[in-house]
Amino acid sequence: MSWIYLIVAGLLEIGWPVGLKMAQTPGTRLVGVAMAVVFIVASGFFLYLAQKQIPIGTAYAVWTGIGAAGTFLVGVLFYQDPATLLRVSGVLLIVSGVVLLKIA
């Protein structure tokens, strides 16, 4: 169950940078900030639950890896962030590291 909590925490981790991005637009500033706060709290709570069984270093690395890769994907798909070969390669290295931590 701890790994499920950790995956949920990582997916929720994607929400707060998106909220901060939304907050940069005057019409969605308050909604964006509120969204960021809600996602930070929810993500932190699930990380807390996951760390009851998963070592802190592993949990933190997986949590941030899911958040970083997911936020990269959201940026490319919805915010026209560049998807150059080097940027995609960097994200694939992050994902590879997360997979290795899970296997270990």
Image (cartoon, rainbow, N blue to C red):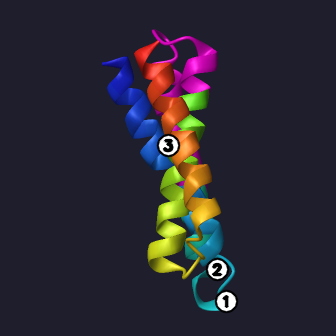
Q: CA distance from mark 2 to mark 1?
A: 5 Å
Q: Do callouts 2 and 1 mark residues in contact (Cβ within 8 Å)?
A: yes
Kind of residue at disc 3:
Ile
Q: CA distance from mark 1 to mark 3?
A: 29 Å
Query: Which element is circle 1 on?
Result: helix
Answer above or below: position of 39 versus 76: above
Quarter occupied by the N terminus: top left
Which of the labelled discs sits on residue 26, or is there none?
1
Residue 11 position, x and y percent, is 43, 46
Query: What residue lies at 55% left-to-right and 31% top-to-bottom?
Result: 97
Which residue bears the numbered disc 3?
A: 66
Residue 5 in view in this figure:
yes
Which residue bears the numbered disc 2?
A: 29
* In-front residue for pair 62/16: 62
The prevailing secondary structure element of the residues shown in magenta is helix
* In-front residue for pair 58/18: 58
Residue 86 position, x and y percent, is 64, 61
Answer above or below: position of 60 versus 41: above
Query: Which element is circle 2 on?
Result: helix
Query: What residue lies at 62% left-to-right and 61% top-to-bottom?
Result: 87
Callout 2: 10 Å neighbours few (<14), some, many (20+)?
some
